[in-house]
Amino acid sequence: MKTHTKLMTFTIAILMSTCSYAADKIISTDVVVVGGGSTGLSAALTAAQGGASVVVLEKNPYLGGSSAFAEGLFAVESEYQRAASHGLTKDEAFKHIIEFNHNKIDNSLIRNYVNKSADNIAWLNEQGIDFRLIQISPEEPRVWHIIEDREHFIHGGALITALQQKAKKAGVKFLLRTPAKKLIYSDNKVTGVEAEDHKGNKIVIKAEAVVIATGGFGNSKKKIAEWTEYNPETFLPALPLNKTGDGIQMAKDIGAKTEGEGLMVYLAARGAGIIPMQGINAMSWQPTNLWVNNSGERFTNEAVAFSFGKAANSVGRQHGNMAWAIFDDASVDYATHKGIDQGIGVIVPTTTKLTGLRTEIDNALAVNSDGVKTASSIEALAKEIGVPVDTLKKNFNDYNSYSENGYDAQFVKDHKWLRPLNHGNLYAIKIMPNHFTSIGGLNINTKMQVLNQDNQPITGLYAGGVEVGGLYGDTYTLWASGHAYGFAIHSGRTAGTSILKEIK
């Protein structure tokens, strides 16, 4: 195995014969990890703790990516569940995930992940990361392991910071603002990457193994349009994290096989004057709302809001990829004084009292928001939101009738979420699908080796996290809350372990 002294080896004359352009710097190492999120850090730390020299390339000036903002990890049969007497088994979870995705996923990959999910939590405990166990909604089991705050870092930021500190102590070298540009490849073998720092200097990193962990393509409208069925003009990213599919594209350029490219969609209130992930957003997720499309028609059981992916699917298939969530003054009072029935993860937890909701609504109305409207009658509200008056009135009256009778004859919403909307003013919030990240991409085996078009491993190339295909059918598996974050850790650790076995 190469020693750490090789990290700064300068051999431009040799490089000129092997790379497509002259380099200003050449680095030799055992492993180069492309991407500094939770997948990349897990891979880097695992490899480094096993004695390998590791370089991490990150194109942003900070580490973490979307993992720094996420909240928790999926796991089954963890010590936290044992302490809570939660009885879900690995077998039960595996079967449910396969069924949820209609067997359109890689069963072996999922089985391996589920079986080792509790090990991921135990390993993270060893790195100084603690968790608390919660249930995200009435429709999901208690599998979400929320990351506890660490000093002044919260949620994903606490995990990223802990892994970064451990990796530095293990000798991992980080090159920030240094995106990889191209894989060094010949004869079905990857032997490094070509990169460029923020000053334009060309860097070549020679390595025995490369791990692709660049976090997907969710910030590339071009790739969303080309690789998925979604409209990038209406399905918007939650955060501008510079995730443009670099790793997937580099692997595709050398013949890697891909599948299942899509988005992890969720519903968001959309319009001027709306503060993201605050009261108005939370109010739009309530299962007691009436949802209508831009024709004024009710189109689903609104309690689907408990599953953000399914809810976004339902709204996303409506004309214009949008709908209106309608509620009344009694609903506002309930959310203000009793608290909401459906939270936004742990950002706005269930039962949170939205004491500032009326102020948020008033502020949005004051700027004539296109996404928040109010009126004293359903006829007036129809005009405010631009839908046919007669159609909205009929759907509104039908809904109130269902609520008063305790039975939804149209979409069979559970009676406990049926509340008449007949108290005071009416409100409407525009809801549209956003996405947290892309999903799908490179085909891999259970060692996290990237596969070529003949379904054979490309020697020296590994991938993990949301870069990977075969994990989801057409919708993110919310039943297994924290599935993507848990897989990021699992795939990074597995890639690191696999590489150690290959290069020893």
Image: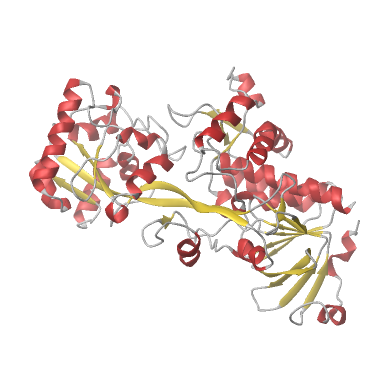
Asked if residue 467 can be seen in this view, the reply is yes
Task: Note whether 487 is above or below 56 in the view shown.
Answer: above
> What quarter of the picture does the N terminus occupy?
bottom right
Task: Note whether 258 is above or below 120 in the view shown.
Answer: below
Tally the numbered discs.
Answer: 0
Residue 6: image quadrant is bottom right
Residue 165: x, y in percent? 72, 49
Query: Residue 252 or 51: which is nearer the viewer?
Result: 252
Q: Residue furthest front?
A: 454
Asked if residue 151 can be seen in this view, the reply is no
Residue 446: image quadrant is top right
Q: Residue furthest top?
A: 85
Instruction: Tell me: 232 left or right of 242.
Output: left
Residue 484: x, y in percent? 57, 44
Residue 67: x, y in percent? 58, 49
Instruction: Tell me: 391 left or right of 70.
Output: left
Residue 244: x, y in percent? 55, 64
Residue 457: image quadrant is bottom right
